[in-house]
Each structure stands twice: as structure tokens, then as C-alpha cells.
Image (cartoon, grey):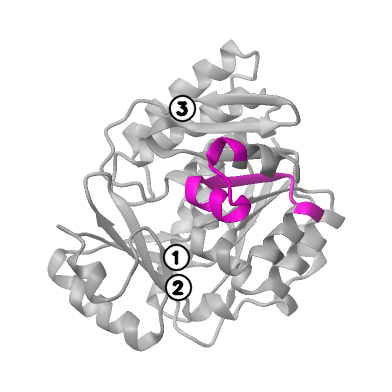
Amino acid sequence: MKSILGIGNALTDILAVLPDDTFLTKFHLPKGSMQWVDRETCDKIFENLKVYGLQYVAGGSAANTITCTSIFGMPSSFIGKIGNDEVGALFQSDQAQYGVKSLLLKGKDISGRAMVLITGSNAERTFADYMGAALELGPDDLKPEYFKGYDYFHIEGYLVQNQALIRKAVELAHAEGCIISIDMASYNVVESNFAFLHDIVDKYVDIVFANETEAKAFTKLEPREALDEIAKSCRIAVVKTGKTGSMVKSGDEYHKIEAWPSTAIDATGAGDTYAAGFLYAHSLGMPLKVCGEVGSIIASKVVEVVGAKIDIPRWKDAKKEIRELIAVSGGPDNL
């Protein structure tokens, strides 16, 4: 089985389901965006959220993806930075529980946390993140030996706030021959790091995952045309279109992937799990269309639960459906 290494913000998700957009307006949080907040704002939002009832889940985009690839059976590792506190310990034990080999460095600040505000009938997510120790991860923390022996290297776009870190990471991964993938993360992250992201994708990235708004921010085009444009810069382009599924392209090969049937209540982690399913199928040598379908299957399970962690019954269902799909496609039956 091929292996994967991820790098990202080691964050604990604090989830709250809100009745409407009033809370977002009060704290000046654009719906559907990801905003970095300072310690004071973080504390205020957290205190005001308590009345809604909160759920705590170890998260972070790349960490979610790597947790899922580990559950699929891929040897999976994660690089991040946490604080010397209870939240950091929770994050570390969560990764260990799912079989992830963590390389969690210790920072001076408290561990990072992402407040996930879930609103509307389509369960749209708005993030208010205090990065804490996660923000202290820097290029000097990375060593060549961390990347040795891995077949895939996955990056979350949220990390591009530290361009020196991302550049060194992709250089080290590229030197080791890794297949490099990136999840664009958020449209405002793409907008504020436009030139840098284009440079990194052109030079190093093999697989790009983006949703509709991220793809438009990256290309200034609508989803279908954006897919074509992104595919010119990398080996495989994926544009996720929510309830209508996704589109994948490699060279002249194009596929429209239908969304797998589900009853969505929270979209948290959908993109992260899609990436995990796609990369898992890709590691098995599956056709491009099957990679997208595996991503769609596992994403359909996470939207049926609150948070980014799929429960055991849904994991069993997903593995059964994926096993059947892969078997029909001539892949191994070892999931």
C-alpha cells in the first residue's frame, strides 16, 4: 500500500449549529468564509457560542484528510504544531486512535482551534480560526528525513499564509519524488495568495482540489472553464460543485462525477474526505472517474453527521460501496 504524508494546521474544531446568520453578522464573519481571528476575538466568539451547545473534534483540513486515508489503510503521517495543553493532547490522541503517525512539534502558544459555525438549510460552514501554536510551524521546522519514503504529500491551502513554509515543504517533497496534492481551502485564501498559489501549482503540484468559489478565485472563470484552466497547470484538476457532484480532468480526459445520495446536515469535512477517497483510489491505480466516485462516496457519509468524523456504521457502508466499485473496476479487494 502506498503511503501519504500531510502537512497542515493542527486545529481542534469547535462546532456550533446556528439558527440563522445573526451571529455571523454580529462578529463580521462573511458567510462561507474562513477568517483568522486574534486571541481576544476568539475568546469573545467562544463565550457567545456556548449557549448553542458545542461539539469538540480534532480537525484541520489536511489532518482530516490524513485521518481518512489512514482508515482506508494507507500508511499515513501528519506534520503540525500544537501547544503544551489539553487541546493539543486531545489532537494527538485523536490521530493516534485512527492510526496516524503524527509528527507534532510543540509551540509556545496554546493549541489552535477552529470555530465552525453551521448555518442555513444547506449546512454552510463559516470558520473563525485562532491559529495559536499551529501558526508557529515554520520552514526551519522541516527536515528532509521527514519526507523520505512517502509516495504522496498533501497540503492544505490554509497554510499558504506562511509562504516560506509551503515552498520549502513542496521542494522537499518534490525532491523525494512525492505526488503532491493541494486543497485550495477557501476562496479568500486563494484571493490573498493568488500569485504564490499559481507559482506553486505550476512548478510542484500534481493534483489540485478546489470547490466552485476557490476555482473561480484561482482562474476568474466559471466551474467548467476553471477546471480546464487548472488542468493546464497540473496533472489532475478536481472542481467540487457541492450537491451536483464534482468534475475531474487530466489532459484531455474529463469526467462529471455525480454526488452520491445522502441526507446532508453539515458539510464540515466534505472536501477533506473527498480528497482522501480520491487519493486512496489513485494510490491503487484506479481510473480517474473511479477516483472521483470514491471521493464522492466518502464525502456523502461525512455530510450526514455533524463535524468531520464519520461514525462506524457509515464507514462500514462506505467501505462496502467503495469495495464493490473498485472490484468492478478491476482493483484489489483489500479494503
- Which residue is tagged 1? 91
For the C terminus, the quadrant is top right
Q: Please say whether residue 7 is visible from this viewpoint.
A: yes
* Magenta span of residues: 202-225
Q: Is residue 7 above or below residue 317?
A: below
Q: Secondary structure at mark 1?
A: helix
**Residue displayed at 50% across by 46% down:** 211
Mark pair 2, 1: CA separation: 5 Å
Kindly identify the amino acid type of the residue bearing the numbered disc 3.
Lys
- Which residue is tagged 3? 319
Residue 214 horizontal side relative to residue 28, left or right: right
Q: Secondary structure at mark 3?
A: helix
Residue 8 horizontal side relative to residue 3, left or right: left
**Residue displayed at 61% across by 54% down:** 218
Mark sitting earlier along the chain (3/2): 2
Q: Residues within 10 Å of mark 2 (few under 14, many from 20)?
A: many
- Which residue is tagged 2? 88
Mark 2 touching mark 1, by CB under 8 A?
Answer: yes
**Residue displayed at 20% across by 71% down:** 49
Kindly identify the amino acid type of the residue bearing the numbered disc 1.
Phe
Q: Position of residue 48 (x, y in %)?
A: 19, 76
Kindly identify the amino acid type of the residue bearing the numbered disc 2.
Gly
Between residues 285 and 29, which one lies in front from this camera angle?
29
Q: Is residue 328 above or below residue 192?
A: above
